[in-house]
Amino acid sequence: MKAEVSTVGIIGGGQLGMFLAQACQKIGLITHIYSDTDDAPAKKYANKIIYGSFNDHKKLNEFRKNVDLLTYEFENVAIKTLKQINKQIKIYPPISALEISQDRKKEKLFFSKNKIKHAGLFFINKKTNLNKFKDKINFPVILKTCRFGYDGKGQYKVKNFADLKNKWKKLSYQSCVIEKVIKFDRELSVICSRNIKKNICFYPPFENIHKNHILFETISPSQIDEKINKQLITISKKILNKLNYIGLLTIEFFLDDENNIYVNEIAPRVHNSGHITLDNANMSQFELHIKAITKDKIKTPKIIKKGLMRNLIGNEIKRTKQISKLKSYKVFKKKKAYDYGKKAIKQGRKMGHINFVM
């Protein structure tokens, strides 16, 4: 494995890969992108782009030969393939963390092992006799697939036992986790990083608002009291260290109306809620991630101004100007719109975002 890093390989060519490529340019690194589609926002900023399936071991192995280390912009990459490649090249964030994040059962068990509060109650699979849980579940609950769920996909709110059986059937009896419903007051995220020297950095927590299970707005920094802030940071440090993590990690939290904190999930990558750091911080989450995986020293980023990020979903990209002028955003002094340049506009697809800054 090469000691000096001059070329970073990024698996995934979406908007997160695009912003990572821009961060690499900023600090003088060459970027190679591996994408499964030509509709890839990152290709505009990559020094080189290669197309292929994310499960194509042969092609991914060829890709790694021309870079000094690998990172990724999303979770759904074949672990078996990455483990083989990892024998030849460093991959950050570590595959062990990615493996946990890909499976909600492994994730909940990790939380439980480390005494981190979460909403998980039971795990079920195709061999499970649901009837044994009939008197143990206080409805309503949330039913989630253990794998490949994001932006509300693969999950249902379940009102009673008959509904549970029906919804599980709709999910083709996949392995699932049953979670209690958290009556949360706020949804929060902590974006943090840890480098090879075990230096840890944090942004102040972000507050997130979802619509139809998709992130709608992020407020930075969140208006939570200092006690809650310290608790979030303590939990996040614990997770970073227990994972022996390198790179940028996003941890999603629920805060209920009694100030109880629950970890919802971890994302071993840069995150939609961190897009506001492109304009309200002295260092974006993308630059922080690249520095964490390539540099011996990283400095704690600072939020310079209060900000709000508004996602542009589907056809909203056609109304960017109108949305930016909405009355609710007039309190902000500056705004900057980002169009990811995706060819296909689809319902529920993130097409861009607007950052508003005080």
Image (cartoon, grey):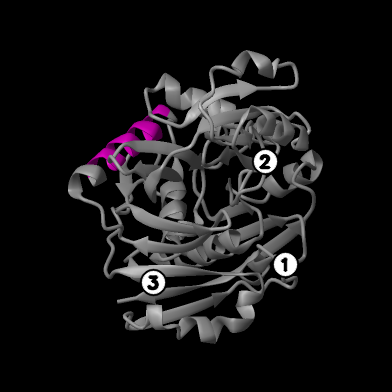
- Do the CB atoms of the residues marked 1 and 3 lie less than 8 Å apart? no
Q: Which mark is residue 346?
A: 1
Which range of residues does the magenta coloring cover? 230-242
Three-letter amino acid code at disc 3? Asp
Q: Position of residue 24 (x, y in %)?
A: 51, 62
Nearest the eye: 52 or 229: 229
Relative side of 248 to 129, left or right: left
Residue at mark 2: 148
Mark yes or no: residue 98 visible.
yes
Three-letter amino acid code at disc 1? Lys
Q: Is residue 167 magenta?
A: no
The quarter of the picture where residue 82 lies is top right
Distance, label 1 to label 3, CA atoms, is 27 Å
Nearest the eye: 69 or 252: 252
The quarter of the picture where residue 78 lies is top right
Q: Which mark is residue 279?
A: 3
Residue neighbourhood size for the residue with mark 3, other residues' Cα within 10 Å, grouped as few (<14), some (14–19), many (≥20): many
Mark 3 residue element? helix
Residue neighbourhood size for the residue with mark 1, other residues' Cα within 10 Å, grouped as few (<14), some (14–19), many (≥20): few
Which mark lies nearer to you, 1 or 3? 1
Mark yes or no: residue 29 visible.
no
Relative side of 52 to 252, left or right: right
